[in-house]
């Protein structure tokens, strides 16, 4: 039975979650630099990066082939490949794995698109349970402002245009992000997500993050301690 | 018209409404002649005036090419493969099969979710997990399970087709044998066990596929005729096509025979089991 839910791997898995514009990627990048500087063996795994699935996803987005179900399943395929390739092996080898977006992104987005809550959770049952899952919470208007000022144009699926909630891209994006934020809020207690207030100063957030992460670190996770190096 | 019934939760965005078509599944392990029989049935149904859609695994616009590329690389992990197939299936279900069924087509599908479930189970996936994923599947109108009497026969058929042994059909990713042949036999044996387990669960109609193609085709035709019957043009064309059945009972008589395939299936099963024991 392949289920990594309650693994006992020597490595650690830290993931960041949040709506677009919540600042989570910035925070993960800073955490990465810090862990590297401290001498830890760190692996970075990004959402939507499987070499086996990337081209299919890109093409489907370009040609607008997705339905909510196929969007969900293809992202799950991508995630499965990353789990098998980029997440489980480094964890077994005793490394620290950092993931920008994890299964909670899928739970939030797919349910916002109308997929059944229980079904989506079942699809991702094979996922490794993170050591800590950070949820960067920013109020809707703050997140939307950040994205709109940073990006000249939203992409079709990113704005949730496939759901036909609104003809207007900016409106559609707001509706979609609102639904996603609701789902995240539900998941805080369901999965024990660690909430970080994304409106605080970047350095403050990073300090909170490092403080929590450091509780799970040990000397054995450092590079020189990894066998064969 | 028939109500749409799904194994689990239906796909979002799909209106559950009665449909006038028929969803007919041809299942079975590699090399049992599924595609041959889909082609024969299609020709016959179209001659009888039925619009037909035929589909099969990895034939989706969404994921078909991606799966083929991933298989070619031989680096596809077990979980990834199962989910890729599920994405392919969901795309075909929503964009091909359901619209065709609503429009009154006979949909012939070369494999359905059962092959996917069998492959996943053989690779150690949680049986409940893979079944939940495929809860989005529509319950078909009929599932014909083509089954041959021995594994050696399957291997013989694969060779006779001129394709030779394929990496994935031989389950080489599972490292079950030293070479393609040994692995093929071991892998297909495991698959067969999974299929046999699903027979009762999903209500397969077992068809003894070790008989000559035209006998198997005649049996399939009789069963399919029963399904689409009530449509006058089918009855007319059945009597016109009787000569195709030759040695088997005529198609019209066939409609009165009480599912001979069930008995044959159980006989076949005991034969294989004694062989592999």
Image: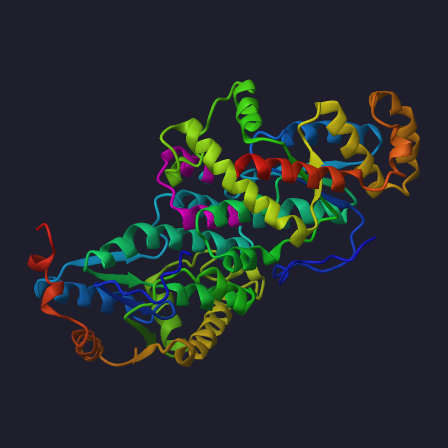
Near-viewer residue (B183 or A206) = B183
Q: What stretch is highlighted in magenta?
A: B67-87
Determine if residue A64 is in view. no
Please tell me whether residue A176 is drawn above or below residue B128 in the rendered image: below
Query: Does the magenta-highlighted stretch encompass residue A160?
Result: no
Please tell me whether residue B103 is drawn above or below residue B45 in the rendered image: below
Query: Does the magenta-highlighted stretch encompass residue B81?
Result: yes
Residue A184 image point, x, y percent: 42, 74
Residue sitting at 47 percent across and 77 percent down? A182
Q: Is residue A7 left or right of residue A36?
A: right
Please tell me whether residue A195 is drawn above or below residue B153 in the rendered image: below
Quarter residue B71 falls in: top left
Near-viewer residue (B144 or B277) = B277
Overall secondary structure of the magenta section: helix
Please tell me whether residue B164 is drawn above or below residue B78 in the rendered image: above
Residue B132 image point, x, y percent: 55, 60
Near-viewer residue (A27 or A91) = A91
- Colour theme: rainbow
Quarter residue B170 falls in: top left
Residue B48 image point, x, y percent: 85, 31
Residue sitting at 91 percent across and 24 percent down? B240
Determine if residue B131 is in view. yes
Q: In this view, does B71 lie to the left or right of B277?
A: left
Q: Is residue B221 left or right of residue B187?
A: right
Label count reads: 0
Quarter residue B222 falls in: top right
Residue A3 image point, x, y percent: 39, 60
């Amino acid at each position: 039975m392949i289920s990594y839910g309650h693994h006992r791997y020597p490595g650690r898995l830290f993931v960041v979650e949040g709506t677009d514009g919540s600042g989570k990627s910035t925070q993960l990048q800073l955490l990465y630099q810090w862990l590297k500087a401290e001498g830890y063996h760190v692996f970075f795994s990004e959402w939507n990066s499987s070499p086996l699935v990337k081209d299919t996803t890109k093409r489907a987005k370009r040609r607008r082939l997705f339905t909510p179900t196929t969007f969900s399943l293809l992202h799950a395929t991508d995630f499965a490949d990353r789990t098998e390739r980029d997440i489980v092996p480094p964890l077994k080898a005793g490394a620290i794995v950092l993931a920008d977006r994890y299964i909670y992104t899928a739970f939030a987005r797919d349910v916002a698109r109308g997929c059944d809550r229980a079904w989506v959770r079942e699809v991702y049952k094979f996922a490794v349970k993170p050591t800590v899952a950070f949820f960067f919470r920013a109020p809707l208007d703050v997140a939307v402002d950040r994205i709109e000022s940073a990006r000249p144009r939203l992409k079709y699926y990113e704005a949730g245009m496939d759901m036909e909630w609104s003809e207007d891209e900016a409106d559609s994006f707001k509706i979609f992000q609102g639904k996603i934020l609701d789902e995240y809020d539900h998941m805080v207690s369901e999965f024990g997500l660690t909430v970080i207030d994304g409106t605080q100063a970047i350095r403050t957030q990073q300090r909170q993050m490092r403080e929590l992460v450091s509780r799970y670190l040990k000397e054995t996770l450092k590079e020189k301690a990894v066998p064969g190096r | 018209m028939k109500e749409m019934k799904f194994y689990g939760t239906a796909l979002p965005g799909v209106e559950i409404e009665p449909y006038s078509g028929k969803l007919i599944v041809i299942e079975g392990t590699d090399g049992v002649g599924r595609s041959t029989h889909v082609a024969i049935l299609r020709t016959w149904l179209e001659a009888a005036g039925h619009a037909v859609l035929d589909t099969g695994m990895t034939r989706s616009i969404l994921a078909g090419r991606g799966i083929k590329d991933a298989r070619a690389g031989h680096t596809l992990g077990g979980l990834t493969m199962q989910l890729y197939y599920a994405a392919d299936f969901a795309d075909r279900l929503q964009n091909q099969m359901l619209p065709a069924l609503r429009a009154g087509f006979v949909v012939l599908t070369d494999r359905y979710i059962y092959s996917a479930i069998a492959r996943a189970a053989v690779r150690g996936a949680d049986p409940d997990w893979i079944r939940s994923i495929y809860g989005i599947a529509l319950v078909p109108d009929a599932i014909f399970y083509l089954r041959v009497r021995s594994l050696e026969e399957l291997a013989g058929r694969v060779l006779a087709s001129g394709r030779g042994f394929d990496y994935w059909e031989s389950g080489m990713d599972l490292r079950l044998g030293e070479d393609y042949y040994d692995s093929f036999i071991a892998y297909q044996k495991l698959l067969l066990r999974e299929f046999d387990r699903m027979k009762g669960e999903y209500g397969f109609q077992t068809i003894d596929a070790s008989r000559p193609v035209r006998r198997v085709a005649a049996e399939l035709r009789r069963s399919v005729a029963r399904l689409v019957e009530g449509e006058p043009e089918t009855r007319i064309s059945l009597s016109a096509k009787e000569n195709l059945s030759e040695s088997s009972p005529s198609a019209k008589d066939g409609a009165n025979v009480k599912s001979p395939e069930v008995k044959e299936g159980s006989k076949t099963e005991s034969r294989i089991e004694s062989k592999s024991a």
